[in-house]
Amino acid sequence: MFTTLIIGSVRLVNQNSLNHQNSLSGRVEVWSKGAWGTVCDDSWDLFDAAVICHQLGYEHTLSAPHRAAFGHGSGPIWLDDVACVGNESSIFNCTHRGISVHNCGHYSDASAVCYKGELYIHPSRYYVVSTDHYIRKLCLSTVGKVRLSTAGSVSTASGQVEISVNGEWGTVCDNAWNLDDATVVCRQLGYDGAWTAHYQPGSGLVKVEDPQCSGEEVTLLDCWTAQSNGGGMFCSHGRDVAVECVTSPSGMHQYECHFVSTIINT
């Protein structure tokens, strides 16, 4: 039996095999001109990912990862600068630069994390709260998760920032670390925000250099970084960054997925 593919067909490619009957996650690929191709993550957000999830029959959009979170694609890059309202019937109905018009490489392939079923959303912080083992595994396995470390041990609300990239943990080095940057890290960990943004010399690998955040990004890898714009690693461990996060009296953060943002419902 052959499946007829039409222009605008979509799929999510995930080599990690973490999908199950209630969820779907992976690199976004769309069908055009007789071939599958990827979507560049410039301006990629939850509204864009929601269109993909709805096309695939999933009611919730958990995350819109950047930076080839599920591996680099190959072949054509069909779309760039996608800007969806969130209710379009096809990703091709969203605003974009034009088919095959882009200025990025496969290191910037966009991804989506979809889910169907019941989820509880924290009323004040808009993070998914779930004790479901699979949901937590799915979120925590995603590239770009962060943790805080103090004297070599994992801390909770304060410490040196460490990030997972390509399966390895390393530090974040920044010559202009500020409260906006720290806020993104703390919110990614499920806290309300950041009290302080400071430096704490570390060791090992430096995985991210000079992130520049507005404070509204979902994850630290969504911020502009030296690597995302073709730069090299020239920062020393003397500028490794640290944060102190605002803790919530509810303690809800311990149940939150670390790589999840605002839910968009159908």
Image (cartoon, rainbow, N blue to C red):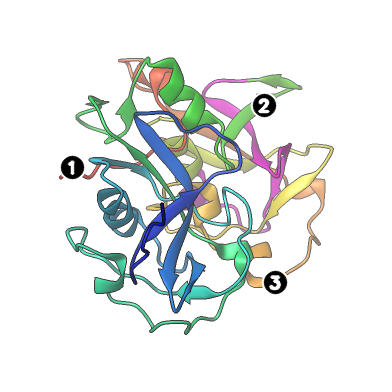
Tell me, yes or no, if residue 249 can be seen here. yes
Give residue 20's mark: none
- Considering depth in this image, is 215 or 37 the residue closer to the camera? 37
Mark count:
3
* Mark closer to the chain start, 3 or 2: 2
Q: Which residue is drawn at 27% across and 54% down?
A: 55
Residue 194 visible in the picture: no
* Residue bearing the label numbered 3: 230
Q: Is mark 3 on a helix, strand or loop?
A: loop
Residue 107 to residue 171: above or below: below
Other-residue count near label 2 (Cα within 10 Å), few / some / many at <14 / 14–19 / ≥20: many
Give the CA distance from mark 1 to mark 2: 35 Å
Rendered location of residue 116, percent (x, y)? 27, 33
In the rendered image, which quarter is residue 152 located in? top right
Q: Which circle's residue, 1 or 2, is located before the other in the chain?
A: 2
Q: Give the range drawn in magenta.
A: 155-182
Residue 75 lies, with reference to residue 103, above or below; the image says: above
Question: In this figure, which residue is indicated by the disc labeled 2?
Answer: 149
Quadrant occupied by the C terminus: top left
Give percent across and percent down for residue 34: 47, 75
| Spot occupied by residue 147 in the image (x, y as percentages of width and height) | 60, 30
- For marks 1 and 2, give the one nearer the viewer: 1
Along the polypeptide, which appears first: circle 3 or circle 1? Answer: 3
